[in-house]
């Protein structure tokens, strides 16, 4: 559970991580497991971040979470929130995807970061108060040092987690959460994917291939 080198200088890893690491070591089991806990940071170093999508915590169903927000392990059927994300992607850009592993997005600079990086099996939010949220804010601030970012803030939790971080140079696309309970209250029709690509094009940067 070694922090990725590109992010290891963040204050969180000196002041917050040791206590969380000890709690995890004493826990009987948690997801996504030691090999994937920092997958989002490993996949997208700070200098490559172009867009940020914030989730809450990993999927609590064993075998589903792969360490990237909203993503599932290869071969796992997309949960309902992710299916709604793909529905909006198809409506927005006409893009269809195969499977629910979003590592192709992460490889292009989409930081898929949960505000808590661990969860007990079957207990959504079980580690939400452990102090993980500091890492999300520090990681975003570090990525901002390398240029403007697009924030895709889906739901009130994401908006609270990022409060005060977006700057005038950044893009903010805020909407309802893609959950089945709220997707029809503003997520559907929000066109986040084309808005990010239009913004990137406006600054002379290549678009994100959301079909990856």
Image (spheres, helix red, strand yellow):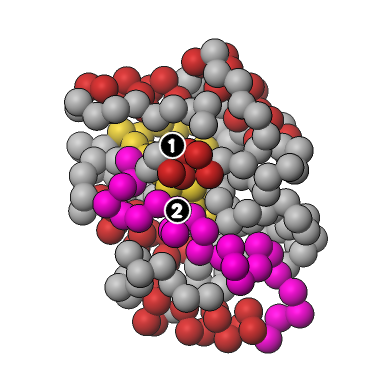
Q: Residue at x 58, y 63 (%)?
A: 36
Residue at point 52%, 84% (across, down): 19
Q: Is residue 39 magenta?
A: yes
Marks 2 and 1 in Cβ contact (< 8 Å): no
Q: Main secondary structure of the magenta part?
A: loop
Q: Position of residue 86 (x, y in %)?
A: 61, 26
What's the CA distance linking mark 2 and mark 1? 18 Å
Q: Residue at x 46, y 44 (%)?
A: 106
Tell me if I can see residue 160 in this picture.
no
User: Mark 2 sits on what residue?
Assistant: 43
- For residue 173, which numbered disc appears in the image? none
Quarter of the rendering containing residue 4: bottom left
The one of 175 and 150 positioned closer to us in this rendering: 150
Q: Is residue 202 left or right of residue 134?
A: left
User: Is 194 situated above or below 139?
Assistant: above
Identify the secondary structure beneath mark 2.
helix
Q: Is residue 59 left or right of residue 136?
A: right
Q: Residues within 10 Å of mark 2 (few under 14, many from 20)?
A: many
Q: Is residue 157 magenta?
A: no
**Residue under the image location 47 percent in, 20 percent down:** 191
Asked if 150 appears above or below 61 in the picture, the reply is: above
Foreground tag (2 vs 1): 2
Q: In which quarter of the view is residue 123 placed?
A: bottom right
Question: Relative to residue 143, is residue 150 depicted above or below?
Answer: above
Count of numbered marks? 2
Residue 152: image tag: 1
| Helix, strand or loop status at disc 1 | strand
**Dot 1, crowdedness within 10 Å: few (<14), some or many (≥20)?**
many
Q: Give, as a single range, the part of the protein colored magenta.
A: 26-50
In the rendering, at what x and y percent does residue 120 appear? 72, 67
């Amino acid at each position: 559970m070694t922090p990725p080198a590109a992010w290891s200088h963040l204050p969180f890893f000196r002041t917050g991580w040791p206590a969380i690491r000890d709690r995890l070591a004493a826990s009987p089991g948690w997801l996504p497991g030691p090999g994937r806990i920092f997958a989002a940071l490993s996949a997208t170093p700070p200098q490559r971040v172009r867009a940020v999508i914030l989730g809450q915590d990993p999927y609590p169903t064993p075998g589903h979470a792969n360490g990237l927000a909203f993503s599932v392990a290869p071969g796992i059927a997309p949960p309902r929130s992710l299916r709604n994300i793909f529905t909006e992607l198809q409506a927005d850009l006409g893009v269809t995807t195969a499977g629910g592993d979003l590592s192709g997005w992460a490889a292009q600079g989409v930081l898929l970061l949960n505000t808590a990086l661990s969860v007990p099996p079957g207990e959504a939010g079980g580690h939400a108060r452990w102090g993980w949220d500091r890492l999300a804010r520090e990681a975003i601030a570090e990525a901002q040092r390398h240029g403007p970012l697009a924030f895709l803030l889906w739901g009130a939790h994401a908006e609270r987690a990022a409060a005060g971080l977006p700057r005038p140079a950044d893009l903010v696309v805020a909407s309802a959460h893609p959950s089945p309970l709220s997707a029809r209250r503003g997520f559907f029709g929000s066109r986040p994917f084309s808005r990010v690509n239009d913004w990137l094009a406006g600054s002379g940067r290549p678009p994100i291939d959301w079909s990856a």
